Image: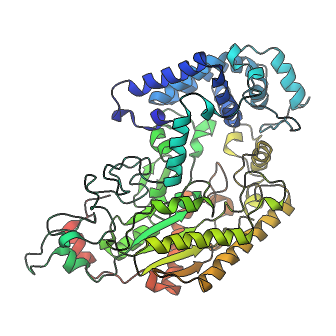
Amino acid sequence: FLFLTIPETWLPDGLGINCLLHFVIGCTFGNIEYARIIKKSGKACTVLVGIAEQLAAIHNKPHTLVKVCDYLPGSYFYLCKILFNFWGDSIIEKLSKQQTPDVVCYSLGICRVDDGQNYCHLFPEPKIGMARATEKSRLKTKVQPFFHWSLVQSLSSPCDLPGIRRVCDSLNLFKKNLNPSVDLDKDKHSTIQVLRGSVWRGMDCNDFDDAVYPGRKPLKEDIETDSNCNGIYGIDTDSGYPYETSLCEGTDQRGIIYIGDSVGAHFHIPSEWITPAEITPGIFEHISFILANEFDWPHLSFATGYMDSNWPQARSKVDSLYWRLHTRNRCNHRDYQNLSFNGANSSTILHCIKSISRSRTTDYPAIVFYASMGNDVCLSYMESPADWITKEKFKQNVVRTLEELDEILPKDSHVILVGLVNGSFIYPSMAHRIHPIGQLRGDVAYSDIYKWLNCMQIGPCFGWMNDNSTWRNATTKKAQELTNVLQDLSLTYSAQSFKLYFLENPISKVIKTWEENGGEKWQLLEPVDSLHPAQEAQPLLTNILWEELESRYPEVLGKENLNNAKIEQLFGEQNGH
């Protein structure tokens, strides 16, 4: 993982590739337990083989399957070639006999069926059924012995492999802390973008001094250096006052801290990556950046976006809560923190509070958004409604988070509880549309995706992405129940360092605005997972939340800085981001 996501320019020539090759080959030939990795990879096998099969069909040459690797840059090309050498011939042979990607993956043992479970299929089921088709295919499988399906049956996690446990533990710790991986002075701000760096929180302007970071009150009025990284320092020779004093003092400086789930992180898998007709050389150009940021795009999000993007994988014009606060008062430059992470819920959010960069004594107040929008009701699989968190436990988690914030935040901060999303529109809007992976033949609709995800027990939201209306209605009811808890807390909870507010989830108003302007609901959802708000929805989310704050709680945003024009004239874009 580390060698695939770290840019190769950071490493001596060939180091990343050589280590990757030794790791893969060493584990493969040196320890039969490497087959455990295959068991985990089975969840992606059907998708990958399906894409490869359609690429071969587009080029009308089955053996062009190997050309798939040519689209990948750097280390990914070599990893792809290694894996193709293990499986490629068998996959080509099976696909040439018109076997479906599902059957291919099951017959090779990459996908498996536990006792009492059914065969899951993403693509149309063979006429003889999945079980019989898999059995027939497996009888003629030509595959390396250490990859044979019989060896996979009793294997579990790759984290059990010798030497891999430490990597897994490090990744888990990284996930809980949400601190930048490259942070020399340990002030929770970084000078690089990826690995929880400056795309997630304001860039450090001196990574060798832990007293210098965005959001702090200036040291010695920033006469000689820029201690809070907002680009404003020095002395106004006309007045004799430091610029921080004359331009920023008394202007209600504050930053934004957004605590949430993958919605706040702006989770986005480029649809071009799984649409065979759109896979072309160069489409994976930014793959290291994308993977190192966990398929999240906080720098383009409604919460903390700060830049325009013309990348083919995500085009956008900057507009976010942070950017509007920055525009309102340019002294707030770089004072943003996005502490969202994929899969976050009211329980796991408790682990990331310590990752907040804020001091009660030295820093400016903050506007904190607590927005666990869906994962307390969106589980990957459910047996019964009893699997949901109780409203009592949910309240307990939120109260504990508020107590932690009260210990961290400077006085006069603000905390805003955002209600859970109502995702009842997802299934009726998407079910009968064709998913990108099925566009070549029109044979995979979103309803097929949902069934497959739920069968594999890996879906992002079992309740709403379900053909059973009873489950969808129950999920909506549960989300409203938890939203009511947040609203009640906003009226009853009292804190020392902040005022508490509540806002309804903005998605419903976003949909209404979009449809009034001639759009359709499905256009607002990510085309790959159909759960997260698409890039088109980001500025609408920003606008709805900002207007709500301006009309209902204007004190949260602070006053507009009348010195903004002068700041821009003197300091331009304040040293960028």
- State how the image is colored: rainbow
Left or right position of 235 against 251: left
Q: Is residue 282 visible?
A: no
* Viewport quadrant of the C terminus: bottom left
444 to 37, vertically: above or below: below
Does the image show residue 508?
yes
The residue under the point 54% across, 41% down is 169
Lateral position of residue 34 relative to residue 403, left or right: right
The spot of residue 29 in percent (x, y) is 59, 15
- In this rendered view, identify the residue nearer to me: 131 or 345: 345
Please tell me in which quadrant of the rendered image residue 409 appears: bottom left
Name the residue: 70% across, 14% down: 145
Image coordinates of residue 386 in percent, x first then y, are 82, 61
Q: Using the image, determine if residue 560 lies above or below residue 387.
A: below
The image quarter in which residue 222 lies: bottom left
Q: Position of residue 417 (x, y in %)?
A: 58, 74
- The front one of 363 and 267 is 363
Residue at figure coordinates x 41%, y 51% from the top left: 180
- Nearer to us in this view, 382 or 324: 382
Tally of numbered discs? 0
Q: Is residue 22 left or right of residue 467?
A: left
Instruction: Tell me residue 469's x, y (percent).
Output: 85, 61
User: Quadrant of residue 235 in the image?
Assistant: bottom left
Extreme residue in the right direction: 128
Quick check: 75 left or right of 126? Answer: left
